[in-house]
Image (spheres, helix red, strand yellow):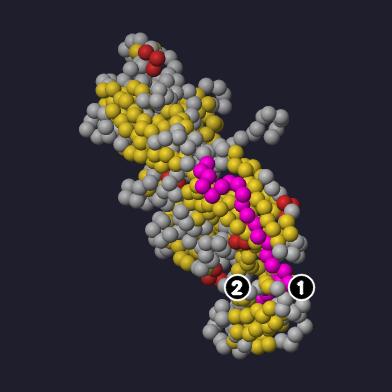
């Protein structure tokens, strides 16, 4: 911020959907970073951060047209940058998250500079592998983290004189874990045990079972138990101990392998203390919410030893569940009578497969905690979209669809719909006329309380375009790029993206934005796109042409046609140093 109300803004790159994490390479001689971009429907991708790059969202995802698995190419369209890697979702890995480069010299040499990345849904960490032809694939690096222990963020850091990989997880309300490379001949065992029961009225006997312990080398194991109550230690996989004095105990299991490696595990035992019993009062089990509703979280809890548990010992959490993965929504909040506004789904695709989970944790005076949950379902409706004539293309919540089609939405969720003039598959040119709800060509539908249908009506249009606002510019003179003809897609213009990315000036699919010097410019130009202008030429003769252009990165090229004849040949647009750094091309 250079001055109150004034923000210095600069676009480094564009065309990303959800750049979840950036990872910088500590081994690079200059600045080098990768971007983990979460996809919408079909592909997860890793992009290299390049100044001026356009990665193609929302016309492309991965190496393919958006939402496609067949319309793909290893060669990026002109003006776009392909990812290093894109992977599909057929194996259950559907949400790329953390990433980190292995620093040189901290792990075996064959891992120097390796890029590691995690997938939130399938609970795996992969390594990025460069093939001989220069392409990239992925290979499993760590598996079996599970949904609750899946890695969200990866970062290398120090630990006891060595460098380890730390990762965060939402497990148990949030944990930081680490992965260390073990270069010894012997790898230590992993200690784990269950304690049944882990609380009770005194005296009571606890059965300890260490059968969940393991050794990565397959070495035989021995087990030593310290029950933390002053009783003698014990050995064996399954042992029992009688607790006769009230208190909180932390028994420890030490597992040793035959080569001197050891590992420990600890659990809590409550003797003479029982867990509290929380209850979620509101929202009720049968409550259904609409987007924007104020939801009240109210609970109570009792404890056999303490009586009524005070609300200061309550912690509320709300998570949003979608298919096989979750997203934190309401951070841990202490107290009672907590309120929050009901959210919408992640997007319209998630309308029929998402819900909220409310969690209430109550802790007694001795630190024992119990958590209860309640599933909170949304009020859903079906939105049907049709066109007259049938078969026209619409954009619904960033999805290009062919009508008729339908989506499951949540009541009060805002859905942006767009109907553009177009050429139908049979070759007929049609012009948008109206929506059945009276909205503009592009407008937001607030999902109603009942299933509803929306019809986009088109009229058959002439194949000829007409001047913008009915008045053609006269030459010699200036033609403003944003004042292309009227008549709709395929007639007055061709734009490969579904929406007006700049969202300025005109309600068409052409990407228009405000310029730094005032006025507007057409941007986000891709190969195959064109604009038509109807002009009046004052008289015969030779004319000088001048085009005002800006680009960043690789630049590009274009040409000008008059009555269907190329009159300029390719005109090269150089890298001008920024999208609003202008230069003139003359012909």
Query: In this rendering, would 421 be left or right of 225?
Result: left
Q: Is label 2 in a helix, a strand or a loop?
A: loop
- Residue at 26% x, 23% y: name it: 460
Q: Which sits in the foreground, 444 or 314?
A: 314
Q: Which mark is residue 247?
A: 1
Say which label, 1 or 2, has the lower sequence index: 2
Bounds of the magenta segment: 262-289
Q: Which residue appears farthest toward the top when viewing the image? A: 538
Q: Position of residue 285 (x, y in %)?
A: 54, 49
Q: Is label 1 in a helix, a strand or a loop?
A: strand
Q: Is residue 42 above or below residue 460?
A: below
Residue that label 2 marks? 181
Marks counted in the figure total: 2
Residue 193 seen anywhere in this rendered image of the structure: yes
Q: Position of residue 306 (x, y in %)?
A: 75, 61
Compute the Cα span from label 1 to label 2.
39 Å
- Residue at 36% x, 20% y: name it: 486
Q: Which mark is residue 2?
A: none
Q: Which sits in the foreground, 499 or 130?
A: 499
If the image is split into quadrants, where does the N terminus sit?
Answer: top right
């Amino acid at each position: 911020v250079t001055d109150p109300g004034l923000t210095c803004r600069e676009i480094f790159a564009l065309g990303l959907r959800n750049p979840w994490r950036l990872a910088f390479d500590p081994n690079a001689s200059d600045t080098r970073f990768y971007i983990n971009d979460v996809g919408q429907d079909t592909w997860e991708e890793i992009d290299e951060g390049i100044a001026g790059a356009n990665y193609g969202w929302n016309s492309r995802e991965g190496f393919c047209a958006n939402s496609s698995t067949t319309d793909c190419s290893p060669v990026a369209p002109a003006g776009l940058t392909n990812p290093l890697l894109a992977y599909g979702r057929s194996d259950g890995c559907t949400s790329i998250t953390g990433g980190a480069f292995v620093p040189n010299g901290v792990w075996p040499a064959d891992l120097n500079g390796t890029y590691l990345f995690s997938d939130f849904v399938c609970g795996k960490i992969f390594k990025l592998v460069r093939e001989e032809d220069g392409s990239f694939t992925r290979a499993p690096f760590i598996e079996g983290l599970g949904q609750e222990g899946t890695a969200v963020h990866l970062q290398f850091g120090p630990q006891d004189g060595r460098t380890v990989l730390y990762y965060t997880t939402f497990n148990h309300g949030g944990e930081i874990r680490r992965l260390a490379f073990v270069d010894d001949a012997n790898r230590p065992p992993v200690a784990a045990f269950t304690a049944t029961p882990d609380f009770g009225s005194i005296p009571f006997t606890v059965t300890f079972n260490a059968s969940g312990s393991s050794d990565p080398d397959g070495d035989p194991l021995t087990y030593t138990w310290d029950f933390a109550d002053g009783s003698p230690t014990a050995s064996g996989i399954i042992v029992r101990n009688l607790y006769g004095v009230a208190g909180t105990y932390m028994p420890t299991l030490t597992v040793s392998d035959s080569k001197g490696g050891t590992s420990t595990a600890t659990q809590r035992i409550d003797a003479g203390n029982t867990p509290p019993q929380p209850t979620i009062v509101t929202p009720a089990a049968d409550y259904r919410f609409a987007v924007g509703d104020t939801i009240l979280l109210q609970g109570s809890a009792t404890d056999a030893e303490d009586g009524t548990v005070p609300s200061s010992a309550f912690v509320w959490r709300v998570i949003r569940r979608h298919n096989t993965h979750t997203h934190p929504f309401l951070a841990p909040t202490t107290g009672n009578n907590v309120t929050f506004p009901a959210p919408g789904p992640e997007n319209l695709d998630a309308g029929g497969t998402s819900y909220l989970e409310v969690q209430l944790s109550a802790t007694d005076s001795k630190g024992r905690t119990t958590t209860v949950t309640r599933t909170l379902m949304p009020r859903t409706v079906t939105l049907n979209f049709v066109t007259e004539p049938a078969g026209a293309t619409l954009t619904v919540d960033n999805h290009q669809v062919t009508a008729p089609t339908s989506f499951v939405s949540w009541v009060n969720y805002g859905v942006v719909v767009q109907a553009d003039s177009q050429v139908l598959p049979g070759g007929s040119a049609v012009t948008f006329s109206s929506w059945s709800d009276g909205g503009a060509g592009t407008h937001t539908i607030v999902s109603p309380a009942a299933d509803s249908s929306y019809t986009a009506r088109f009229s058959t249009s002439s194949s000829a375009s007409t001047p913008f606002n009915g008045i053609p510019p006269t030459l010699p003179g200036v033609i403003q790029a944003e004042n292309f003809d009227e008549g709709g897609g395929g007639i007055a213009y061709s734009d490969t993206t579904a929406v007006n990315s700049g969202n300025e000036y005109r309600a068409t699919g052409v990407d228009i934005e405000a310029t730094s010097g005032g006025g507007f410019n057409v941007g986000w130009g891709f190969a195959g796109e064109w604009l038509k202008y109807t002009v009046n030429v004052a008289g015969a003769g030779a004319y000088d042409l001048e085009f005002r252009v800006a680009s960043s990165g690789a630049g590009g090229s274009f040409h000008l046609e008059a009555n269907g004849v190329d009159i300029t040949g390719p005109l090269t647009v150089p890298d001008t140093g920024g999208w609003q750094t202008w230069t003139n091309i003359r012909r």
